[in-house]
Image (spheres, grey):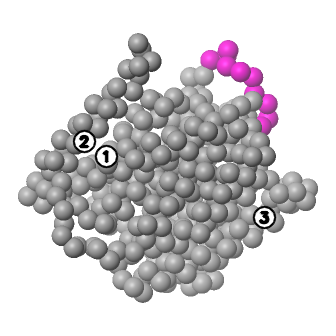
Amino acid sequence: MASRIKYLWLLVFQVILVILFCVFVRYDGDNKVNLRGYEDTHVMIYVGFGFLMTFLMKYCYGAVGINWLLAALVAQWSIITQGLFHMKDMIIPLNKKVILEADVMSATVLITFGALLGRASVNQLLFIAIVEALIGSLNLYIIEKVIEGSDVGGSMGIHTYGAFFGLAVSAAWVCCRKKRDQPQDDDGHPLEKPSYMTDVTSMIGSVFLFIYWPSFNAALTATDADYQRAVVNTYLSLAACSVVTFALSAFLRHGKFEMEHIQNSTLAGGVGVGTVCNMHITPGGAIIIGMGAAFVSVFGFAKLKASIYNNCPCLFLYLTISALTISLCEYIWR
C-alpha cells in the first residue's frame, strides 16, 4: 500500500497548481509572440539535459524520465513563483516570454539534478526542485530588479545558482554520510561509472546543448543587435572552448580523450560567456572567455573531483574560490 501512495502528494501538488493557475494566470494577448529562442530552449531542456544525464550506467534509464518529470513540474511551478514578482492587479500575465523563463528555471533545477543523480530519491529531487525554484525566482528578482545586474544568458542566476545549490546539498550529504557507506576509490563512488553506451547517449545530449546554446543565451535579449551579438559571442566561446577541451583532455590523459571532459567541459564556454554575451566584448574576447572556461572546467574535473568528493573542507574552499572568480570577472567586464 505504501508504494501505491508514494507519489500521491505529487498529484495533490498538481491540483494546487491548477487552482493557482485558474485564479491568478491569464493570457497576455499577442505580447511577446515573436520572441525568439523558446523552441530551441525547449529542446535543450528535454533532449539536451535529458540525455546528458545518462552518463551513469546504473541510472541511465531513470535519468531521462526524471529529467522530464522535474522539468514539467518546475515549468508550471516557476510560472507562479516568478509571476509573484510581476503581478498586475493580482493577475500573472502569461505569454511566450513567461514560458521561456519557466523553461530557463527548469534548467537551474536540472543542473542541480546532475550533482545529485544517483544519490537522491525521486521524492527528494521533487522536493528540492520545488524549494529551489522558489528561492531561484527570488534570486533572479534580486539580480534583475534590485541590483540591476546584467545576466541575459543566466550565467549567474541560472548556471551558478543551480550548480552551487547542488554542491551545497551534496556537501550536506558528504558531511553526514555514514561509515557504512560503500567504499570509494580515487575516482569516487563505485556506482559512479559510465559504460560505452551511456557515454554515447550522454554525448547526444552534449551535442544538442552545444547546437542550441547560442539561442538559449540570446533568447531574452532586448534588441536585434543584442540578439546577434549574443549568438555570435556564444558560438565563438563554445567553439574555442571545445578545441581547448579536447587538447587539454588528451594532454592529461596521455593522448586519449576523457569522455567526461568532452561531455561537460565543451559546454563551459556557453556558461562562461552568458552574462556578457550581448555586450561589446569583441569576438576575440568571446574566444578568450571560452578558452578560460575550458581550462577551469577540465582541470576541475581532472584534479579537483576526487579530492572534493572525499574532503568536505576542500569543497567549501572550491566554492569560495569559484564565487570570488565569478565576482571578479563581473567587476572587470563592468
Task: Give the residue at the far top of this rendering.
Answer: 1
Relative image position of residue 18 (x, y in whole percent) = 22, 42
Q: Which residue is mark 3?
A: 246
* Res 111 visible: yes
- Label 3 crowd (10 A; few <14 / some 14-19 / many >=20): many
Q: Earlier in the sequence, mark 2 or mark 3?
A: 2
Q: Which residue is mark 1?
A: 77
Q: Nearer the viewer, mark 2 or mark 1?
A: 2
Query: Which residue is at 27% across, 49% downward?
Result: 81
Magenta range is 178-187
Relative image position of residue 129 (x, y in whole percent) = 41, 40
Query: Which residue is at 61% across, 33% downward?
Result: 118
Res 17 label:
2
Relative image position of residue 228 (x, y in whole percent) = 47, 83
Q: Nearer the viewer, mark 1 or mark 3?
A: 1
> Is residue 180 covered in magenta?
yes
> In the picture provided, is 235 more to the left or to the right than 100?
right
Marks 2 and 3, how far apart at CA:
45 Å
> In the picture provided, is 167 more to the left or to the right than 100?
right
